[in-house]
Image (cartoon, grey):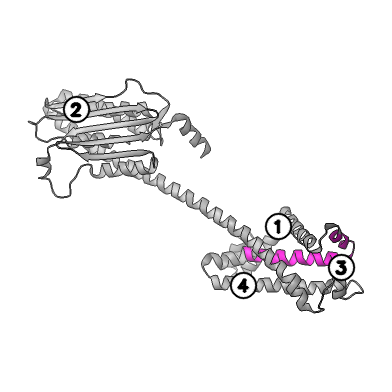
């Protein structure tokens, strides 16, 4: 029954039990042709197996009593099975009321069996023979019809119908679960990415602010680079995967911007391919937190030599990212307890790697004698794979 009709019944004060019953008969009324054909063929097949010959069974349809017997099985079992599927399962089984569900199913099976048993007698009224003579039943008692004919058939029909329904419910549940998990992961990825953006903004704005008084020309140059980075971040990398060459170009601009505020004691060494194939893509900003951390954790003592070494290679569809930076651990020991390399940015990127590249990356962050080292092996995705995923899903 349509939801609008149920709402009207509820507003009119119609009891819920009657609404469920009305809904049940509405479902029966909307039976599709393939449902009718299924039950017709199902009982014809079982009757043929019981009789041993399809030709013999078809001969029964020449007589009225054969049609009545056949329709009794079809109608009683169809009504009983669909009552279990559309009333008992949602009302009891799916709500965890298992005792009521199983007792109700037993009651439905008994009702179906009794109805079919009496239908044998109804069929015999159309002939001059007794039900026992007509259907070769021995011993001549209703218990024989109930026990050997009606009950096994009803149990089989209920078992088949509920098996199909429960399998369908399980498949639908798995689909919904996967959809929810996908939605959850996408939401979490967006949240992790949004956490990175303020982190980057605060660091860069603070650097430019320091340069305004000390070196206005350098501050102006930094603002130009900063605007380009923001443009890239806001408009060019909203997809789940972007071309690898674009991400590396972003990293290059970031390195140049961060290097502007360093003194003469700073040394930056970069080793990466001159050209990057356009077929490879990567999740945006997946490498940026490592770059930020390297600048964040180089020695604060301006008299000490500071350095950052970055090496990027692309081999056989994998990205090899190796980053090392100097560190003064004596100063680090003076920091408040609990402060460590990475902070929120590193935690986020680890989580993003686990979500986007499960079992296809290897990240090692280590503390050497006078430096921090990050080594990441990442299996890259190709553009055609990304486009195919978009088309499919």
| 311 left or right, relative to 53 | left
Q: Which residue is mark 1?
A: 31
Marks 2 & 4, CB-CB < 8 Å contact: no
Disc 2 residue crowd, few under 14, some 14–19, many 20+, Cα 10 Å: some
Marks 2 & 1, CB-CB < 8 Å contact: no
SS label for mark 1? loop
Q: Which residue is mark 2?
A: 259
- Which corner quadrant of the image does residue 285 belong to? top left
Residue 370: x and y, percent?
14, 36
Q: Which residue is mark 4?
A: 104
Look at discs 1 and 3 and give the one toward the viewer. Answer: 3
Residue 389: x and y, percent?
49, 36
Q: Which residues are magenta?
A: 56-85
Sequence-first disc among 4 and 1:
1
> Residue at (52%, 55%) from the top-left corner?
173
SS label for mark 4? helix
Asked if residue 203 is positioned above or below residue 103 in the image, the reply reads: above
Q: Which residue is mark 3?
A: 65
What's the CA distance linking mark 2 and mark 3?
97 Å
What's the CA distance linking mark 2 and mark 4?
76 Å
> Residue at (50%, 34%) from the top-left corner?
388
Asked if residue 36 is positioned above or below residue 246 in the image, the reply reads: below
Q: Nearer the viewer, residue 103 or 203?
A: 103
Look at discs 2 and 4 and give the one toward the viewer. Answer: 4
- Which corner quadrant of the image does residue 21 belong to? bottom right
SS label for mark 2? helix
């Amino acid at each position: 029954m349509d939801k609008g009709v149920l709402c009207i019944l509820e507003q009119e004060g119609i009891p819920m039990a009657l609404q469920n019953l009305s809904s049940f008969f509405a479902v029966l009324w909307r039976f599709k042709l393939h449902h009718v054909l299924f039950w017709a063929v199902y009982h014809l097949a079982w009757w043929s197996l019981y009789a041993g010959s399809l030709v013999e069974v078809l001969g029964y349809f020449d007589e009225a009593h054969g049609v009545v017997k056949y329709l009794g099985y079809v109608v009683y079992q169809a009504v009983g099975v669909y009552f279990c599927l559309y009333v008992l399962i949602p009302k009891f089984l799916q709500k965890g009321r298992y005792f009521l569900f199983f007792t109700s199913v037993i009651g439905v099976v008994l009702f179906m069996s009794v109805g079919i048993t009496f239908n044998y007698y109804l069929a015999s009224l159309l002939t001059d023979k007794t039900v026992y003579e007509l259907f070769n039943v021995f011993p001549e008692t209703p218990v024989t019809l109930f026990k050997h004919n009606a009950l096994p058939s009803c149990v089989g029909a209920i078992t088949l119908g509920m098996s199909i329904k429960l399998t369908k419910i399980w498949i639908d549940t798995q689909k919904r679960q996967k959809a929810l998990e996908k939605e959850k992961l996408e939401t979490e990825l967006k949240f992790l990415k949004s956490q990175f953006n303020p982190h980057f903004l605060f660091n860069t704005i603070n650097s430019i602010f320091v340069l305004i008084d000390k070196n206005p020309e350098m501050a102006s140059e930094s603002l130009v680079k900063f605007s380009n980075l923001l443009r890239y971040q806001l408009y060019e990398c909203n997809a789940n995967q972007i071309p690898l060459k674009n991400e590396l170009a972003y990293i290059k601009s970031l390195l140049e911007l961060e290097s502007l505020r360093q003194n003469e004691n700073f040394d930056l060494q970069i080793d990466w391919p001159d050209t990057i194939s356009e077929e490879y893509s990567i999740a945006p900003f997946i490498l940026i937190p490592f770059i930020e951390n390297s600048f964040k954790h180089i020695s604060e003592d301006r008299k000490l030599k500071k350095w950052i070494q970055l090496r990027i290679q692309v081999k056989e569809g994998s990205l090899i990212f190796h980053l090392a930076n100097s560190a003064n651990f004596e100063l680090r020991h003076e920091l408040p307890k609990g402060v460590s390399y990475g902070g929120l940015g590193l935690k986020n990127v680890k989580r993003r790697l686990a979500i986007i590249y499960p079992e296809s990356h290897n990240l090692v962050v280590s503390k050497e004698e006078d430096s921090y080292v990050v080594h990441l092996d990442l299996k890259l995705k190709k553009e055609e794979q990304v486009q195919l995923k978009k088309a499919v899903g």
